[in-house]
Image: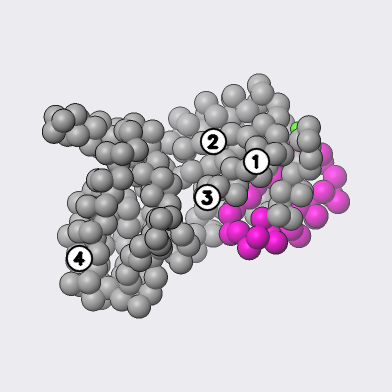
Amino acid sequence: MILSVVLRIYIPTIYSIFELAPILIPMKLLLVEDEKELADLLVESLTKEKFVIETAEDFATAMEKITLYEYDCILLDLGLPDGSGLDILKNLKTEGKAENVIIISARDSLDDKLTGLHLGADDYLTKPFHVAELNARIMAVLRRKKMDGKNSLDFGHLSLDLENRSASVREKDIPLNRKEFDILNYFLFNKNRLVTRTALAEYVWGDFIDQADNFDFIYSQIKNLRKKLREANAGVEIKAVYGAGYRIIKL
Ligand code: CA
């Protein structure tokens, strides 16, 4: 049992050494695309870029996933067999969701572009495009939205330096282990938002380990993190949301 836990913890750690993307933890993407060949190609390429990517090949699946999970960025085709990507955008807007969206569409009409951007899309890429171009757009959108071009995430008195993977409160370092840093990083990307335990586990560990062990481990890491934040007077707290997960808030 202990050995299996140790192995399970170490495998993703070794893996994470190779995550050299400019943003230092894997970003979770949803690709909404009904052309299977294109979808497969994008999944393969974006996985190589260290994105965690899920797919939806129709309107209904996309809506279901968007309702259940949170993504850093949604890549959205407009022409879907059972609906329009624009309606997905409308829905995100009415639900007050803050997901970043890049429209990927063969429709090269100014109308669609304007409608999409008006509905809150962050960017619009016309098919066919190079994967490198899409990758650059994703990184640009994520940087612009979530980090304002900075390399740190700040909340309360807490500051997370993403380049050096360190945390501080009023310039004083808080020692964190690798997983604590990843967890805190994920919370700060999702300030004031509900973070489910499943999302957190998937995000920090990928699909490597089974959920039960994951949740125990998350529970103890969060306990440690809370203590460190409290002792450092970080001015933020990780609140438990009963039966659902957690939310980081300012005190
Ligand atoms: Ca399509």
Q: Would residue 169 be found to the left or right of residue 117 on screen?
A: left
Residue 10 rendering spot, x and y as whole percentages: 21, 34
Q: Quadrant of residue 83?
A: top right
Label 3 sits on what residue type?
Glu
The quarter of the picture where the N terminus appears is top left
Pointer 1 residue: 62
Q: Amino acid at mark 1?
A: Ala
Secondary structure beneath dot 2 equals strand
Of labels 2 and 3, earlier in sequence is 2
Position of 110 relative to 3 (above/below): below
Q: State ligand 1's quadrant.
A: top right
Mark pair 4, 2: CA separation: 34 Å
Answer with mark 4 or mark 2, whichever residue precedes in sequence: 2
Residue drawn at 66 percent across, 21 percent down: 37
| Residue designated by label 4 | 228
The Cα–Cα distance between marks 4 and 3, rounded to whole angstroms, is 27 Å
Estimate the spatial distance between the alpha carbons at disc 1 and disc 2, rounded to whole Å: 10 Å
Residue topped by disc 3: 70
Who comes first in sequence, dot 4 or dot 3? Answer: 3
Horizontal and vertical percent position of residue 181:
28, 54
Residue numbers of the magenta segment: 92-120
Residue closer to the observer: 58 or 168: 58
Q: Position of residue 202 (x, y in %)?
A: 40, 41
> Do callouts 4 and 3 mark residues in contact (Cβ within 8 Å)?
no
Closer to the N terminus: mark 4 or mark 1? 1
Q: At x 43% / y 52%, what residue is drawn?
A: 196
Nearest-to-viewer mark from 1 and 2? 1
